[in-house]
Image (cartoon, rainbow, N blue to C red):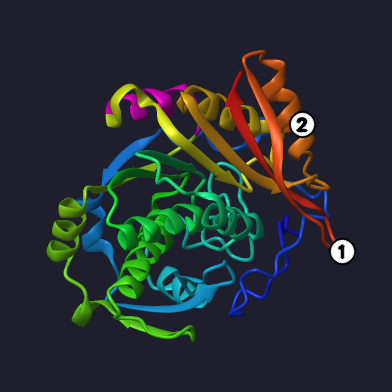
């Protein structure tokens, strides 16, 4: 039986029906895993030609609601394409191959709503690690468009396919809502072939001072080095991560990148479950690792109690 991180119906419109992992049937020993993918930078202009001509969407239960590409639409495209993720089968995670970015995760919804509630000044430079559907960053992108405020957003996910199939379409859908091309709060289809122009989209973002950059690959020193070549000093006012610390093997690598990427007066916000049963990670281990390094402090800024596993958002700052 494959490791199941959550048990949502893949064809369901309710992608928020996720639960903490309850099985210890994790994948094979780390020594048997595929090598980590090296980080690679992808400018917006290089990914826009991959946008599907039609995007089926629904709305994530964030506050306010954010549009996102429907899972069934992504899966249909995967079935008809020859990509690294075409043969996932019923796996929700395959270590060092696929880390779950095709679906929206519970904590990303938490973090997106928290940002909507608390952000009064849009950060000039934002990094989201393990972005997947990128709901937290998209909440900031929505605010940028509404307030006509510029800034740079770097969206990093382990898989290029995720960036193409989910992250980019979601970015365009948020823009579509802003432009009035998507109305109401019901699911539907966005005709990108008729309603979207890559050239006009890039021009509009440039005039607004908004830069969006994509990055694939594994967390680690190589990613920090590439971030340094992408954004001045490789430092960000805000670093985001949701459902990124469930795997002990990679949680330390995530923490390395976060702490190196946060500018001196900046902060990181990490949304996660209190504990990931059967996997080994969780908020307490993350906080212990961060504070054990001596120069940083953590505190919980919001918690979510449920019948299942409690969820928290932790803020990380330099002392």
Of residues 133 and 75, which is closer to you in this image?
A: 133
Q: Is residue 150 visible?
A: yes
Q: Residue beneath label 2, please?
A: 285
Q: Are marks 2 and 1 in contact (CB under 8 Å)?
A: no
Give the position of the C terminus as an image quadrant. top right
Q: Name the residue located 67 percent from the left edge and 75 percent from the top edge.
A: 9
Q: Is residue 152 magenta?
A: no
* Residue 43, x across and y down, in percent: 24, 45
Q: Name the residue located 45 percent from the left edge and 76 percent from the top edge.
A: 73
Left/right placement of residue 6 relative to residue 57 reads right
> Of callouts 2 and 1, which one flags the residue occurring earlier in the amino acid sequence?
2
Magenta stretch prevailing secondary structure: helix
* Residue 54, x across and y down, in percent: 31, 79
Q: Is residue 27 visible?
A: no
Residue 307: numbered disc: 1
Which range is magenta?
219-229
Q: Residues within 10 Å of mark 1 (few under 14, many from 20)?
A: few
Q: Name the residue located 46 percent from the left edge and 27 percent from the top edge.
A: 261
């Amino acid at each position: 039986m494959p490791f199941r991180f959550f048990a949502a119906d893949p064809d369901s419109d309710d992608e928020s029906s996720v639960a903490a992992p309850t099985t210890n049937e994790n994948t094979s020993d780390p020594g048997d895993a595929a090598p980590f993918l090296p980080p690679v930078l992808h400018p917006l202009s290089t990914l826009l030609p991959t946008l599907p001509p039609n995007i089926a969407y629904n709305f994530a239960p964030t506050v306010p609601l954010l549009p996102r590409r429907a899972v069934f639409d992504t899966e249909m495209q995967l079935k008809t394409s020859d990509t690294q993720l075409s043969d996932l089968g019923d796996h929700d995670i395959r270590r060092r191959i696929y880390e779950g970015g095709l679906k929206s995760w519970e904590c990303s919804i938490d973090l997106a709503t928290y940002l909507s509630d608390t952000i009064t000044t849009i950060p000039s430079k934002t990094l989201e690690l393990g972005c997947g559907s990128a709901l937290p960053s998209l909440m900031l992108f929505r605010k940028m468009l509404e307030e006509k405020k510029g800034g740079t957003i770097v969206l990093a996910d382990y898989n290029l396919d995720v960036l193409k199939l989910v992250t980019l379409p979601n970015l365009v859908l948020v823009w579509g809502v802003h432009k009035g091309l998507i109305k109401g709060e019901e699911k539907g289809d966005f005709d990108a072939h008729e309603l979207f122009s890559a050239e006009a989209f890039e021009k509009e973002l440039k005039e607004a001072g908004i830069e969006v950059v994509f990055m694939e690959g594994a967390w680690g020193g190589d990613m920090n080095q590439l971030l340094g070549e992408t954004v001045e000093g490789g430092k960000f006012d805000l670093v985001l991560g949701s459902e990124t610390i469930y795997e002990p093997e990679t949680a330390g690598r995530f923490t390395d990148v976060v702490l190196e990427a946060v500018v001196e007066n900046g902060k990181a916000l990490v949304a996660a479950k209190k504990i990931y049963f059967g996997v080994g990670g969780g908020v307490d281990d993350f906080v212990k690792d961060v504070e054990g390094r001596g120069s940083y402090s953590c505190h919980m800024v919001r918690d979510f109690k449920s019948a299942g596993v409690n969820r928290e958002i932790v803020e990380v700052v330099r002392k």
